[in-house]
């Protein structure tokens, strides 16, 4: 960001989870940046215990998608030069915002995917909850100021998620590309910690001649619960 330049928080709507296709008129920029935003991180734990045991220690299951909470201020009282008073107050501004974050996408059968950016904030996800608090009105009841309290649930594209997690647990599915000199027992040992599982791997890949693996060949290592 260049010094002295006022950057505005921007919300851009997309129709696809890869964020390649922008939605027409699916962009919203705030005129009053938020005073704060809140990230929430949650861990899911498995507390099931085996029959006959008295207690179980919580065991990590998975990390849930992060959540972002943001307040969006809408104002047509005249205090913001770019948003002078209008006959409809904040109604049009609020409807434009709802079209970006709340409108139902017929192709995906869900609300739009949104990318939220501001300074160091870059968040990808979709709206899960929003309530709008109307705070100031004209004498005829037209709302002039409101605050939209929104919650978004984030996600990472599958290919990026797999790369980030880089799971090495033997109860997870793995794909490996054969390198020169590698053998199936050796690869089974690297994945499962036990070379004897190579026969199950050969069966899962329908390998007739598993002794002559070719460099560049992709091998599927299925989940094995020891």
Image: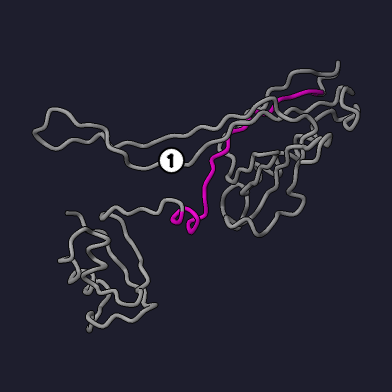
Counting from the top left corner in percent of width and height, residue 158 is at 48, 56
Highlighted range, magenta = 143-163
Occupied quadrant, residue 82 = top right
How dense is the environment of label 1, judged by Cα within 10 Å: few (below 14), some, or many (20 and up)?
some
The outermost residue toward the left is 52
The outermost residue toward the top is 139
Q: Is residue 86 visible?
A: no
Coloration of the structure image? one colour
Q: In the rendered view of the protein, which quadrant contains the C terminus?
A: bottom left
Check if residue 156 falls in the magenta segment: yes
Q: Residue at x 11, y 36 (%)?
A: 51
Q: In the rendered view of the protein, which quadrant contains the N terminus?
A: top right
Occupied quadrant, residue 42 = top left
| SS at badge 1 | loop
Is 156 left, or right, of 182 in this rendering? Answer: right
Q: How many marks?
A: 1
Q: Residue at x 31, y 39 (%)?
A: 60
Residue that mark 1 sits on: 64
Counting from the top left corner in percent of width and height, residue 164 is at 46, 52
Q: Residue at x 18, y 65 (%)?
A: 195
Q: Is residue 96 visible?
A: yes
The one of 202 and 211 positioned closer to us in this rendering:
211
Image vertical order of residue 13 relative to residue 82, above or below: below
Is 220 left, or right, of 115 in this rendering? Answer: left
Is 175 left, or right, of 164 in this rendering? Answer: left
The one of 202 and 147 positioned closer to us in this rendering:
202
The outermost residue toward the front is 181
Counting from the top left corner in percent of width and height, residue 206 is at 25, 78
Check if residue 144 falls in the magenta segment: yes
Counting from the top left corner in percent of width and height, residue 190 is at 26, 62
Occupied quadrant, residue 97 = top right
């Amino acid at each position: 960001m260049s010094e002295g330049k006022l950057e505005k928080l921007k919300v851009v709507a997309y129709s696809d989870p890869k964020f390649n296709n922008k939605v027409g008129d699916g962009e919203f920029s705030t005129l009053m940046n938020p005073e704060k935003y809140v990230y929430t991180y949650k861990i899911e734990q498995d507390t099931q215990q085996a029959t006959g045991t008295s207690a179980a220690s919580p065991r990590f299951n998975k990390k849930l998608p992060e959540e972002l909470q943001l307040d969006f201020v809408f104002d047509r009282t005249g205090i913001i030069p770019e948003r002078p008073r209008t006959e409809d107050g904040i109604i049009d501004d609020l409807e434009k915002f709802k079209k970006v974050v709340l409108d139902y996408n017929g192709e995906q059968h869900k609300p739009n995917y949104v990318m939220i950016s501001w300074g160091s904030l870059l968040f990808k996800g979709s709206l899960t909850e929003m309530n709008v608090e109307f705070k100031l009105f004209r004498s005829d009841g037209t709302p002039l100021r409101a605050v939209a309290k929104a919650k978004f649930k984030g996600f990472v594209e599958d290919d990026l998620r797999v790369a980030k997690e880089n799971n090495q647990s033997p109860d997870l599915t793995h794909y490996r590309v054969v390198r020169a000199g590698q053998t199936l027992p050796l690869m089974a040992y690297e994945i499962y910690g036990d070379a004897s599982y190579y026969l199950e791997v050969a069966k899962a890949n329908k390998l007739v001649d598993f002794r002559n693996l070719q460099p560049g060949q992709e091998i599927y290592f299925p989940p094995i619960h020891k």
